Image: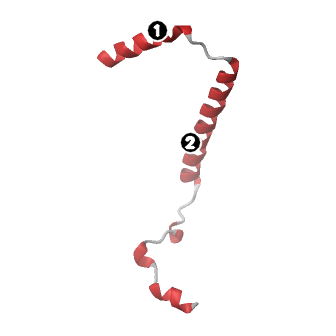
Amino acid sequence: MNELATMLVLAQSADGYRLSAGGWVVMILSVGFVTLLLAWCIWKVLATPGETNKLHAQADIDPHDADAE
């Protein structure tokens, strides 16, 4: 509960500082971009069909493949 009181005191003491219009634009664009990026990443992970044949472990790599060149 002590952290909450500290946050409230800091929030009240910052009343003299106001965000300009440019600050609001930058904040909204940056928060919006990060939110959209997170949503796209989650959608991409959930919407991609199970393509497990593209995943390989270190043990699956044949060291003799490099000799073929």
Report the quarter where the C terminus lies. bottom right
First along the sequence among labels 1 and 2: 1
Tally of numbered tags: 2
Neighbour class for label 2 at 10 Å: few (<14), some, many (≥20)? Answer: few
Residue indicated by mark 2: 38
Q: Helix, strand, or loop for circle 2?
A: helix
Name the residue located 54 percent from the left edge and 65 percent from the top edge: 51
Against 3, residue 44 (above or below) is below
Q: Is residue 61 left or right of residue 16?
A: left
Where in the figure is residue 19, as x and y percent of width and height? 62, 17
Against 36, residue 3 (above or below) is above
Name the residue located 44 percent from the left edge and 78 percent from the top edge: 60
Q: Of discs 1 and 2, which sits in the foreground?
A: 1
- Say which mark, if any, is on residue 60: none
Amino acid type for the residue under numbered disc 1: Gln
Amino acid type for the residue under numbered disc 2: Leu
Q: Is residue 13 left or right of residue 47?
A: left
Residue indicated by mark 1: 12
Give whichever of 59, 6 is nearer the camera: 6
Labelled pair 1, 2 in contact (Cβ < 8 Å): no
Q: CA distance from mark 1 to mark 2?
A: 32 Å
